[in-house]
Image (cartoon, rainbow, N blue to C red):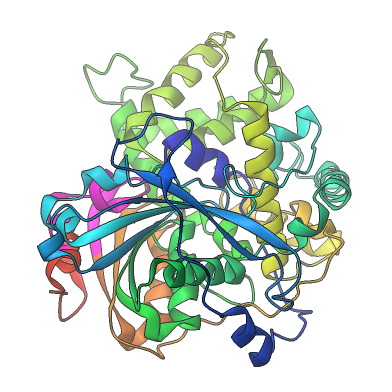
Amino acid sequence: MTKIKRNAALLAASTAVLALTAPLTATATAAAAAAPKPLDWTKCEGAETDPRQRCATLEVPMDYAHPKGEKIEIAVSRIPAEKPSARRGALFLIPGGPGGSGLNSPSDKGQRLPEQVRDAYDLIGIDPRGLAASTQVDCGLEHGDLAASKLRPWPAADGSITENMATARRTAKACARNGGDLIRNLSTANEARDIDRIRAALGERRISAWGVSYGTYVGAVYSQLFPHRTDRFVLDSNLDPDHTRVARAWNAGHEAGVEDTFPEFAKWASAPGNPDRVAKTAAEIRPLFLRLAERLDREPIPWPGANPEELNGNVLRQTMLNALYDPDRFAELAKLIRAARKGTVPPAPEGPPEAVLQNVSAVGAGTLCNDVAWPRSAAAYEKDVAASRAAHPLTAGMPRNAMLCAAWPFEPKEAPVRITDEGPSNILLVQNERDVATPLKGALKMREALGRRATMVTVNSTGHDAYLANGNECGDRTVSRYLATGDRPDQDTYCA
């Protein structure tokens, strides 16, 4: 998926604690698993794609507890294996998010895969339930509530979360009013069930997968629910799978992610010869950034065309968070810092169309809020935010704050899936050491949960998305070899 879509999807991150209902019954799950019809492949519509890519839609139950009830459509794409005599099966390219589109992944990121991998697998892309070419969901949020610094719950300059709680109530109410029955049936477990329905429609006994970011959690949940259906699984840029917190743990992880990654930005932004140089030494960058954010809290700069139409402290902090996803984006943050210090702003950034943001935000909200129940008490968030602000001033309390799930009007329909070491040992984790969105600290929790099922390749690199993106040659080679040949490291490996 594109970086724009990835970043828009990740705007909605966070989720919570207990108060869960019983899981789906075995009878309902078995009934839902009746074999679907084969897929009817046609030319893909819309964006330019590889001419070999074909698209189809698959009907799945909206609610797997009622498999004979209302149906929704899942959009699927495929580029067949390039060497039929070497074909092993289907490789699912599971997008991040929640809210990331993967329908065109076979045509873009799939073509970065080495020839030996493309020879062996049909490349399968999907738009998860609720998204884009699949049956869509929309919360109908106000324009201001689609701002990146609003979708992330940044506290007020004084640490107050009063406005965040009001935003949570307003946006959760909009999702309940406009999201229909579909928004209640968005969840990671249901996305995994949709993938298994696609597997069945493809006629595959087992599938392989490359899941990225939130896609690592989807892949882990699939491997837990359908272990006998897994072949070679690669989980890239891994999330903490804590079943008591789910995305609340992911959002909290930004504290460690920013602390791990900001020093790399500081080195880059102080390098001699850098046209976007911010300071003469790396040690100056952090206090400079913090002082500037505090000044913008007090004295925002008008920013026509942006959302919101001012550069305040939280907009600067959100820009920092976005830029740390990829070293190629460091210049974006440096240019904003340099302009703001002079009391000016660069041209307003271009974001996705509002209709795309509405859709992505709704999918993110429904998935995160339905996976596990969130605390409802403002006092709990106030305490966490205060502690977070004191320990991690760069993130200013945002990672522990309340998003719309704190006011979500629905209870989860089932308990979150607990990731364990039960199942075949066929998972390879790949993880950058410095990753702002899925930090190494959380990835090690995924490694621990999977136990004997997995080995892990830790890559000495900076940025989100390791394999064939922001990793290194050693990590890429290790993952490619596993997908192509099944040769996985016998033990956890470090790629320097």
Q: Is residue 96 left or right of residue 270?
A: right
Residue 344 vs residue 225, the one in the foreground: 225
The relative height of residue 207 versus residue 214 in the rendered view (above or below) is below
Residue shown at 17%/65% (left/top)?
Answer: 87
- Give how far across and how far down residue 432 sits, in percent: 30, 55
Residue shown at 35%/51% (left/top)?
Answer: 78
- Give how far across and how far down residue 137 sits, in percent: 71, 47
| 278 within the magenta span | no
Q: Quadrant of the N terminus?
A: top left
Residue 359 vs residue 312, the one in the foreground: 359
| 460 within the magenta span | yes
The relative height of residue 436 versus residue 372 in the rendered view (above or below) is above
- Give how far across and how far down residue 395 sits, in percent: 58, 45
Residue 152 shows in the view: no
| Total residue callouts | 0
Residue shown at 43%/44% (left/top)?
Answer: 42
Q: Is residue 306 left or right of residue 174?
A: left
Residue shown at 53%/14% (left/top)?
Answer: 341
Q: Is residue 293 left or right of residue 198?
A: right
Residue 59 picture quarter: bottom right
Q: Quadrant of the C terminus?
A: bottom left
- Give how far across and how far down residue 313 sits, in percent: 65, 29
Residue 332 shows in the view: yes
Residue 166 picture quarter: top right
Q: What is the magenta range?
A: 458-478
